[in-house]
Image (cartoon, grey):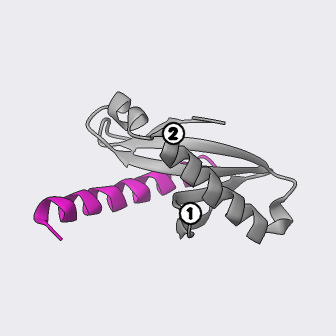
Amino acid sequence: MSEKRRKAEKAGRRGEALAAIAYRLRGYTILETRFKTKVGEIDLIARKKNVIVFIEVKHRATIDAGVYSVTNAQSRRIDGAANLFMAKMRALDHCERRNDIVITGATRWPHIIKDAWR
């Protein structure tokens, strides 16, 4: 792995940790981190009451760069992984689902975009 890739990986993990803290401070429980399936990976999965949130974390220089870095193909992969998670966790069938994007690096504290796509 190149030095540049190693630094990006470290920044991404730090961003995921900050995002998890931000959600915990808002009353969410983190159910999974780096949930991996054959169709894709979800950075964080959180729950608050009857809402399950599938969270994509992006470490970018600007908020716009973070938002636009989540492509349609990536959002479909996340949705596919979310479907597999929900199939595995039948006890959560009654919960609403939401997809958030969290951008780190652009501001001192993670910037959360709730319900980024449907």
Above or below — where is 37 with respect to 26?
below
Query: Contact, CB < 8 Å: mark 1 with mark 2?
Result: no
- Count the labels in the image: 2
Name the residue carrying label 2. 72
Residue type highlighted by circle 2: Asn
Residue 46 counted in the magenta span: no
Identify the disc placed on residue 16. none
Residue 112 is left or right of residue 115, and the answer is left
Residue 4 is left or right of residue 95, and the answer is left
- Residue pictured at 77% horizontal, 66% vertical: 87
Other residues around mark 1 within 10 Å, as few (<14) / some (14–19) / many (≥20): few
Identify the disc placed on residue 39. 1
User: Residue most toward the left?
Assistant: 3
Of 30 and 72, the residue lying toward us: 72
- Residue 7 place in picture, x, y as percent: 19, 60
- For the C terminus, the quadrant is top right
Q: Which residues are magenta?
A: 1-28
Q: How far is disc 1 from disc 2 in space, using C-alphas? A: 14 Å
